[in-house]
Image (tube, coloured by chain):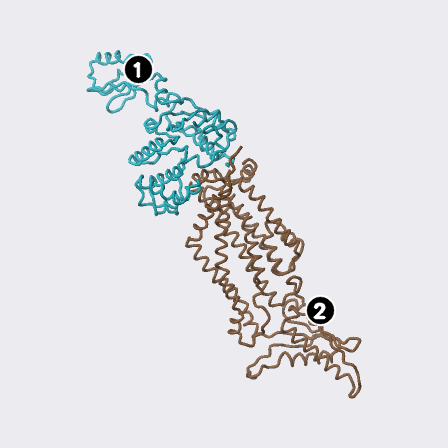
Chain colours: A cyan, B brown
Amino acid sequence: MSLEIDHVTKRFGTTTALDRLTFEVGRGEVFGFLGANGAGKTTTMRICLGIIRPDSGEIRWAGQAAAVLPRRTWGYLPEERGLYPRMGVLDQLVYFGSLYGEPPDRARREARAWLTRFRILDYADRRAEELSKGNQQKVQFIAAVLHEPEVLLMDEPFTGLDPVNLVLLRDAFTELRDRGRTLIFSTHQMEAAEALCESVAIVDLGRVVAGGRVRDLKRASGRRTLRVVLGGDPAPHWLESLPGVATVARDAIGADLDLLSTADPDAILAAILGHGASVTRFDLAEPSLEALFIEHVGRAPDDELAVSTDRGTASVTAGGFA
Amino acid sequence: MRRRDPLLPNAGIIARREYRDRTRSPLFIVSTILLAVLAMMVAIAPIGVRLIDRQSVSRLVVISSDAELGTRALAVAESLLNSPPAGVDLATWQRPYQLEIGSDPETTEALLSRGLVAGIMLVERQANGGVDVRLRTAEGPTSARSQILSVAAFGVGVLDWSSRVPSGALAPFVTPTYTVESINTATDGGAPLDIRQAASRYLLGIVFVILLLISIIIYGMWVATGVASEKSSRVMELMISAASPRQMLAGKVVGIGSAGLTQYAMIALPALILLAFQDRIASALLGPDWISGAPLGGLTAGLLLGYGLFFLLGFALFALIYAAMGSFVSRPDDLQTLSLPLSLVAMAGYLIAIVALGGGSGTIVTLASLLPPFSPFVMLARVMVSAVEPWELVLSIGLLIAAIGVVAVIATRMYAAGVLLYGQRPGLRAFVTAARRA
């Protein structure tokens, strides 16, 4: 049982938002949908939900077309956060639960359990507008999961959360995954994706440029990073001339050396010692998800595209939803 | 194949939230109280009019080609209409009627149509010797004044007969003929209305049509603002995954429409209670000798039902368009400009309705009473003051329901496209594209 995004194409006027987008997410996986603004993440999620229709291709869950599945199959946390400002938090959650077919009593019970878990039960009877942005975001997350959807789609779920709330949300992800739910989220925050995702799809301009299990992607890249911290001068000028080093990223403590696939770590260590430097840290690691992203997309995930097609989606869309 | 979400239960859940949200707002409560007080004042206004009318002098003009007959008729009418009630102080008592002989029928007729003269008594002798009395008035034949003048006509006949027949001679008495010609166009099922009823219906008609206009524009804007607020607060993003546009649109229109109906009931109920007790209130204010039998209000259950029906249908039609408009703006502020054309359409319906209330029955009035979106206003006005053929009423309501069906389909498409539209000023092209493609 899996979610299949099968050659989905969607155009808005002259802009191609999705170009034969194809990837698969296994049931019970936490999946990272990585891409810069305008890569087509929101459009893909909206097609999953049946809000907009693809020009071609199909999205299937457990072999069935997504467009015919009941709404409660999906939970959706949109990127644009919003609640009814003057409505009570608990009333609001029961309302959304009821729309997804939850009996009010059960929705109320579940909502209280989630509010307790997110440490905001005291706000249950407050108006949404009285809550901080972070707390409103948690309420929105609860609204998306209250009906226990099989697939949870989340657009930038970590944006705007402080570190404490970030941990609370990550723990909730893990628990939902353990309960057999499939979680798909888009994010700019590569550390979060690295910590949570088993698989990812890196998308650029509506196409998957790399995808699969994170471990496999890292291995396949052939790239390694060497973290070097030296005594005395933390990042001397001769680091670039070491054998097999492609690039050097310096910081206040040391430097990250991006190695060529042919590089020999022993030869590098010998060369450093040959310069008379004392080595306090020499740490060989697989490339970060961010490095992989840059390798495949050619820029960092939070670099804006010249034309933001996701915003374009919102402003030119005329596709109705079911 | 596409998912086809049934309208219920989600439309019901959305309607319930909308209803609660509106009816619990302080603005709703304050405006309901204010309007209820206003409606009570309107309900009691006819009694006030009567109170003022009682103290005024009505002018009656007698016209006859036979000067002697005319003078005789004037004397009889004078003795019947201007006899002081028992027990009044004659020094301060004012005669309620000013009677005079008129010479030019055309000038007098003009005065009658302008309301400066209450009635014209046309008195003529017939070929058979009898007297013919015609009362031209804006009132109906059942009005108290018309009834008194029928007695006067008989009196004129008797006096005329006795003055013409020589003493001791035998001549048959020919009963005088008496007819009331009402110049009033207001009718009820084809029968002319009494002037008080007609005035009351006219007044009620204006009140009803204004109420309809205000409620359609205010409650319609509630719908539009509701949709626009959901967009601007971005809660729409959550809603679109939880409910279909059809469910959202129906829920909004039904929920806010019900809130409007609740307000209407709360405004109308105290006014109706006042109307139910109008006889007692009138007796208390006007004294026990006030002329009973003439209805003060002219308000019937049928008319109230008619108002309720046209409110429901008219609101449904306009609210659907308002909702589609609301989905095309990103901020509620932008609605003012966008909703202006629709408010103007409603205003046009209102103006034609006012013409219909004034007795207008031209092609435009008839057509507008049949065709949406004007029919809720104009047909309501026509029903208030004039005879409407049953087929006209059925056709008008039928066309209105059909229009609601068509508008619902188009509005749902526009809504579906509009709710995802951000940061773009909506133009006509955007509406058309949305309606066609969605």
> As drawn, is B115 to the left or to the right of B67?
left
Quadrant showing the C terminus of chain B: top right
**Which chain letter matches label 2?**
B
Q: Amino acid at mark 1?
A: Val
Residue at the spot of label 1: A245
Q: Is residue A185 visible?
A: no
**Label 1 secondary element:** strand
The residue that mark 2 highlights is B106
Q: Position of residue B373 (x, y in %)?
A: 59, 49
Residue B274's place in the image compared with B9, above or below, is: below
x and y, in percent, of residue A164 in the image? 28, 36
Instruction: Work out whether residue B275 or residue B66 is closer to the camera in this orientation and state it.
Output: B275
Q: Quadrant of residue B298?
A: bottom right
Residue B58: image location, x then y, percent: 61, 74
Residue B97 vs residue A106, the one in the foreground: A106
> In which quadrant of the rendered view does residue B137 lie?
bottom right
- Badge 2 density bin: few <14, some 14–19, many ≥20, Cα 10 Å: few
Q: Secondary structure at mark 2?
A: helix
* Amino acid identity at mark 2: Glu
Q: CA distance from mark 1 to mark 2?
A: 115 Å
